[in-house]
Amino acid sequence: MKINNVVIIGAGTMGQGIAQWFAQQNIVVEMVDQNFEFAQKSLERIRESLVKLESLGKLTSAQVTEMKKNLSVKKLEHVNTKADLVVEAIIENLDVKKNLFKDLDLLMSKETILATNTSSFPVTQIASSLSADRKKNFLGLHFFNPATIMKLVEVINGMETDKNVSAFLIKWFNDKKKIACECSDSPGFIVNRVARNFYGEALRAVECYTEDKCREVDTVMKEVGGFKMGPFELMDLIGIDINFSVTESVYNSFFHEARFKPHRLQRDMVAANRLGKKTGKGFYHYES
Amino acid sequence: MNPNTMVVAHPDHPLYMELIKHFKVRTIDEALNTYETCELVIDLSPLRTQKKFLFIKELAKTTKAPIISDLTLSWGEWILKYAPHVGATLSTLFYNPTNAFEYSLRDSGDAEMKKNIEDFAAVMNLKAIEHKNLGLSFHYPRTIAMIINEAYFALGEKLATPESIDLAMKNGVNYPLGPIEWGEKIGLHNVAQLLEELNTITRDERYRLSPELKLQAFKHF
């Protein structure tokens, strides 16, 4: 097994970051998005980012030239079908993902490893649309935003994943200075599961919303707990809607386990379009 | 700091070695039986609500001094409502990575009590962070206990190794410590006691203890 050519499907924030990280490892990267122009814009942003890294002295001009050469945008039907790895980073919609992987199963060489960057769906469920042989070459690779900076990759084994494939990727990522943590296929994997109560318990501590109460919890968790951001600041940064959606997903996947129960404050904030920094208002107010 | 301060603490308390450098430190039994004259009591006993309440009630019979009580394992709001001798509360039982602690005043305008807390923090080289309107529990212990509990649920289900769980939380969401190592520093028996207390008070299943955590917490008993 080797990783020299990678296809990234989905050119949003995660796809773009993952593509850039692979490019920075001198891997040939093809980016695909159902919106071709959007993918081209993502590619342009990666190029700008590489130039910025050069201006900061973190990359040489020769490295940037090489990385840019390795990056391209393709339509799905034109990708290198012998690529070593495909990473899917499209919308979190189970049916859309399953259909995409069904197509990829037919399109890609049988040696190609297929991976999903899903943060919420069971890997085994996504793999259900694949042929029996392909399921062995299918797993979850969960990157964290921004993928070029955050070192963690959760490597998730589906029920049919060949352990040699995950072992190979763990070693490969570790060699490239990522921190690859292997985990089994359980809702939220490690981080999105264990971190749920950083938010859930904070919401219950506040119970009825006031900005002062949120600030007090945030202050305590930073000053006493040593966290870089408090739970309310972090929810505002992530997007309260996204955080709520992940909470609901984990809660539903665990068949309504009380530990993951969403809080009505999350629902009310979303209903009021107070989604955090992106809308200028969340648990806190932000100047436009 | 009032030189005539008595501290009640068990040798297992994370600050014990530092406490004995600065204060006369007494165990629960000693505090109840010596009738020492003091002008301030700082009670750091690791007791849950009911035992804490009874202890404070007995302690108040031996001294007229105001009491600052550690309510890490107790229902803070309840103690403040029913134990009038307690002028302020704090939470020092759980190890934390920043040398800081939460405190709450019965009366937010009580300047003398606030000064007592600040003096205690200064002597102990700690930072005191005020928590107004103390409800069920202090913020830090209840939140970190829930994170640790979930990590142990995950361990029990063989989701990943303890090392992977710690690495993932430190590198995926920048936690200062992994939840497994955090739990070991706090003491899993403390984590377990707090969750059991929260479960007892609220009857909310969310505070149900992970069987794996329970196994580990009480393995030395």
Image (cartoon, coloured by chain):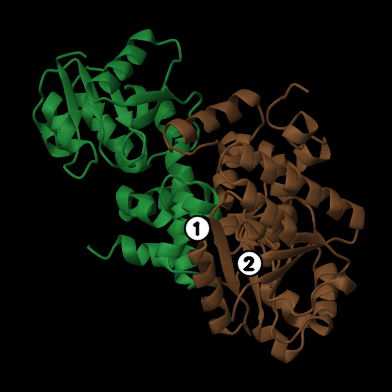
* Point 83% across, 72% down: residue: A79
Q: Chain of mark 1?
A: B
Residue neighbourhood size for the residue with mark 2, other residues' Cα within 10 Å, grouped as few (<14), some (14–19), many (≥20) = many
The picture places residue A102, in percent across and down from the top left corner, at 83, 80
Q: Is residue A145 visible?
A: no
According to the rendering, which colour does chain B have? green
Q: Nearer the viewer, residue B207 or B79?
A: B207
Q: Is residue A244 left or right of residue A176?
A: right
Mark 1 Cα-neighbour bin, 10 Å: few <14, some 14–19, many ≥20: many
Marking on residue A141: 2
Q: Looking at the rendering, which quadrant does residue A213 occupy?
A: top right
Q: Residue at x 90, y 61 (%)?
A: A34
Q: Quadrant of the N terminus of chain B?
A: top left
Residue at 69% x, 48% y is A243
Q: Secondary structure at mark 2?
A: strand
Q: Are marks 1 and 2 on the same chain?
A: no
Q: Which mark is residue B137?
A: none
Answer left or right for B94 relative to A260: left
Asked whether B77 or A113 is in front, the reply is A113
Tell me where residue A94 sits by quadrant. bottom right
**For the residues marked 1 and 2, what is the alpha-carbon distance in whole angstroms?**
13 Å
Chain drawn brown in the picture: A
Q: Amino acid at mark 2?
A: Leu
Q: Is residue A48 above or below residue B87?
A: below
Who's the residue at 62% across and 56% down the image? A24
Foreground: disc 1 or disc 2: 2
Q: Chain of mark 2?
A: A
| Three-letter code for the amino acid on which mark 1 is drawn | Ala
Residue closest to the eye, B93 or A27: A27
Q: Which residue ends up furthest to the bottom in the rendered image?
A: A132
Relative image position of residue A110 (x, y in whole percent): 73, 87
